[in-house]
Image: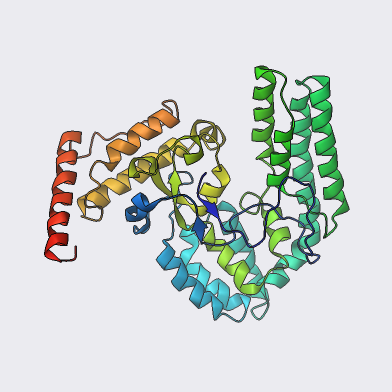
Amino acid sequence: MRIRPISVYKYNPPAYTVGLTVPRYGYLQSAEVDTVTFQGNNTSAGNVLKKLRNVICPYTGVKMISGAEIRGIEKRIDKSTNIKTGVGILSGYTGYMQKVEKQMFEIFKKYSEINPGGKFQDCLKKMYDDALAKLKIEEFLVLDNVDKISLELSPKAALAVRSKTTRCRQVILANRAEDTFKRKTFITSLDEITPSNPDEAKILERMKDQALYLPTSGTSENAFVVKYAGRSEQEIAKRLLRASVATIEHVRPDSKGGGNTLGNFMLVSAQANSNRANMPLEKYIGRYPDIPKYCQQYINQIINLIYKGKLGGCETYPYKIKKTLVQETNGQVVLNLSKYRYTERQAEKMVKQYHLRAGKNIIAGNRY
């Protein structure tokens, strides 16, 4: 199980519908990051990473915000009274925003210049109808691709897939508050189809990978508009930064045997953590080919922080995470540590010395 965000709504698989009463502006109900509180299996070994600031996400290349920083920013947002003041607060953090969030910020900024006393919600409501139509088209295109792949299955399995995609289209077109379409629910429903042989199992996996392209508020402006048009002013403003909150990522998912050790952890943005889910990193790189470059930039920053004494006792981390990334990406990510001034043996010695000093301080009752 990977680190999962605690949602603002409850997810009840595997049915296609849930009895939620939502406002008109509440069509999209996909499982996404809406808060900055995370739960999951033990990640205490990664706590030392969570204290770091301004580290880039190894999956997106965007600077991340620490949990302590986001709390302070959100307190300021809570005091904002209109879109102008909200945009004013957010303007100092555009360098932390992900692609869609930055695009939405620019839209809000232009709206605030024309309507300084207006609201974030007003801006989204003006865009809602057009965004909803475009969103449905985006969803249909993905479902069409799923149907196309299903033709490679046996007739019985292909028909089972068509029944599910047809149901999804019905839900999307109906646009009823009590009958909402959820990406995660659809993907889970594909698990109900039993493959007749190993080849069909691979085809079903390809279909689920394709289904992950269904738009979310983190990948589509239209999905963002539709999902947040009915939310509160403060929630909309906070959402622009929450995607960039730093979280601990299992490089090898714990559900697939990945250990809860520092050598299996990277600091990644909340949105990237949620977006990858349990997808093998090798496959995730196929979707985001710049990941190897960003991973190198990430480790370069980590090395500089080690030199500055920010990661005492973690001198072996670059070597450990390099090995993990090579294994999990089948050699697609090979970190260059040639400029790291410590050999692996020297790093191991430094870690031992650090823990020895720490142990002595504990015995002496000192803080370190």
- Nearest the viewer among 90 and 260 is 260
Could you say where residue 34 lies in the image, as x and y percent from the top left? 59, 60
Is 165 on the left-hand or right-hand side of 272? right
- Nearest the viewer among 87 and 31 is 31
Q: Which residue is drawn at 36% across and 30% down?
A: 334
Could you say where residue 269 lies in the image, as x and y percent from the top left? 48, 52
> In this orientation, does residue 105 appear?
yes
- The quadrant of the image that shows the C terminus is bottom left
127 w.r.t. 222: above or below = below
Is 166 on the left-hand or right-hand side of 364? right
235 w.r.t. 161: above or below = below
Is 240 on the left-hand or right-hand side of 195? left
- Nearest the viewer among 126 and 13 is 13
256 w.r.t. 39: above or below = above
Quarter of the figure with residue 179? bottom right
Rendered image coloring scheme = rainbow
Could you say where residue 211 lies in the image, as x and y percent from the top left? 69, 38
> In this orientation, does residue 109 appear?
no
Q: Which residue is drawn at 73% across and 39% down?
A: 189
Q: Which residue is drawn at 24% across and 41% down?
A: 316
Is 266 on the left-hand or right-hand side of 361? right
Could you say where residue 237 lies in the image, as x and y percent from the top left? 59, 68
